[in-house]
Image (cartoon, rainbow, N blue to C red):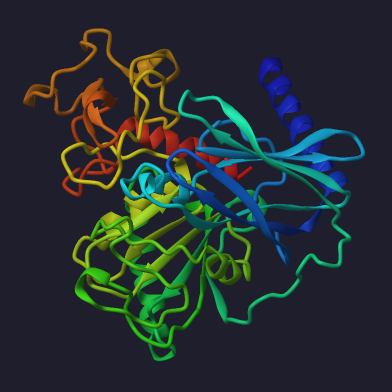
Amino acid sequence: MKLLQTLLFICFIHTAYSQNNYSRFFTEQSMRVDFIFAGNNKTEKLYLEQIKKESLWGGSKTNLIDRFNYGEYKFEVIDSTTDQIIFTRGFCTLFEEWQTTNEAQKIDRSYYQTIIFPFPKNPVNLKVYSRKWEGDFVLAYETTINPTDYFINPETKNFSFKKLVDNGDPANNVDLVFLAEGYTLAEMDKFENDVRKMTNYLFLQEPFKSTAKKFNIWIVNSPSDESGTDIPGEGVYRKTIMNSSFYTFDSDRYLTTPDVKSVRDIAGIVPYDDICIIVNTDKYGGGGVFNHYAIFSANHLLSEKVFIHEFGHSFAGLGDEYYNSSTSYNDYYNTAIEPWSTNLTTLVNFDTKWKSMINSNTPIPTPRINENKDLVGVFEGGGYVSKGVYSPVMDCRMKSNEAGGFCPVCSKGILDMIEFKSK
């Protein structure tokens, strides 16, 4: 009993200290920093585009320092008066994905990118780091931001919104915001019904079913001039509010939007931890980028399954476990180092992954044979390649639509992120 009381006391002290740290350094608003990422397959350059003040911070007020080390990039916010690191997060970008395509070997391109953190009370030093092929982070950009700078833009968009699921304070819950893409003003009822369909499915799946009380669900009614989305390979173009499109990197099922500025402007109306963009189309596809957004079609037979797969990427940083479908990527993973995604390994440093979840009688690597279909093991194939990258089970939601759901390893990764973002 004394041990339990001591642990509870330590937990209380840590929480109180973290909350005091928040109030010492931050206001209740958010600071959004917008960049242009530019270059080719061998070069990158970050350019500051604008800084915005958003009205609400929807994240945790205790877990300010990232403990996962996920992402191809990360940033640090350093208080200038104490030289203390007061906030960190990892993230991924469409730019770094594009760098692995054939096109990036021939031309330069630029992509919009944003990061967000609590609005600081004092001037801060912002550092952005890029993960190199060898796995190490190097400084890619640095600037000082004064929160009283009159060039910080406080303008907000004016869209109606609704809280569909309310489990309490955003600081103590995971807040998901769903944005309408390719829905006209007359289709806002359909948008809300489509979101309810997706979230109902989400909370029927583990580990979300067991943690449903830790989520708030918001919708923002962001109407488009026309229904649908762009499908360039079919000559289809629609006037939509977030400029989404299939055929990203010339992959017909890869649905994204490079217009992250519009995405963040719309999402910033409410507090949020993760952005979900639902697109009013019956074409199969979607996309998910860690700490960026999840995007998916609304009207396909498999839309709900695509949604939770893409949400696995954007929310928990899970990697793709499939290896027998064509992609536009070349050499996405360096097999000489351990990938950062929790559900993929190269066996270079497997002790840091799911080794403790494997039965001692299970061979490593684990053969892809029928008698192993229910085992947690180390199955070669994943991360878009059949050799050199391994995944935890023979089939999982991060591999296919036929899987029963998320495997134990992916579920643990999701649960870890839910815990981190809801405290």
Farthest residue, direction bottom: 186
Left or right? Give the position of 384 relative to 20. Answer: left
In the rendered structure, the answer to whether residue 301 lies left or right of residue 333 reads left
Determine the residue located farthest toward the left in the rendered image: 370
- Answer left or right for 375 relative to 313: left
Number of marks present in the image shown: 0
Where residue 408 sits, quadrant-wise, is: top left
Looking at the image, which residue sits at the far top? 361
**Could you say which is closer to the camera, residue 5 or residue 112?**
112
Query: In the current view of this chain or complex, which residue is farthest to the front?
Result: 106
Residue 201's place in the image compared with 368, above or below, is: below
- Measured as percent of width and height from the top left, residue 57 is found at 70, 57
Q: Nearer the viewer, residue 102 or 81?
A: 102
Q: Depth check: give the residue in front, 416 or 69.
A: 69
Q: Residue at x 73, y 20 (%)?
A: 6
Q: In which quadrant of the rendered image does the C terminus lie?
A: top right
Residue 29: x, y in percent? 76, 60
Q: Quadrant of the N terminus?
A: top right
Vertical order, 214 against 335 (above or below) = below
Which residue lies at the image location 28% right of the left edge and 25% below the top edge? Answer: 389
Residue 124: x and y in percent read 82, 45
Q: Residue at x 62, y 35 (%)?
A: 66
Residue 208: tell me if it is visible: no
- Tell me if I can see residue 205 in this picture: yes
Q: Is residue 236 left or right of residue 91?
A: left
* Image position, residue 395 (x, y; %): 20, 36
Q: Quadrant of residue 251?
A: bottom left
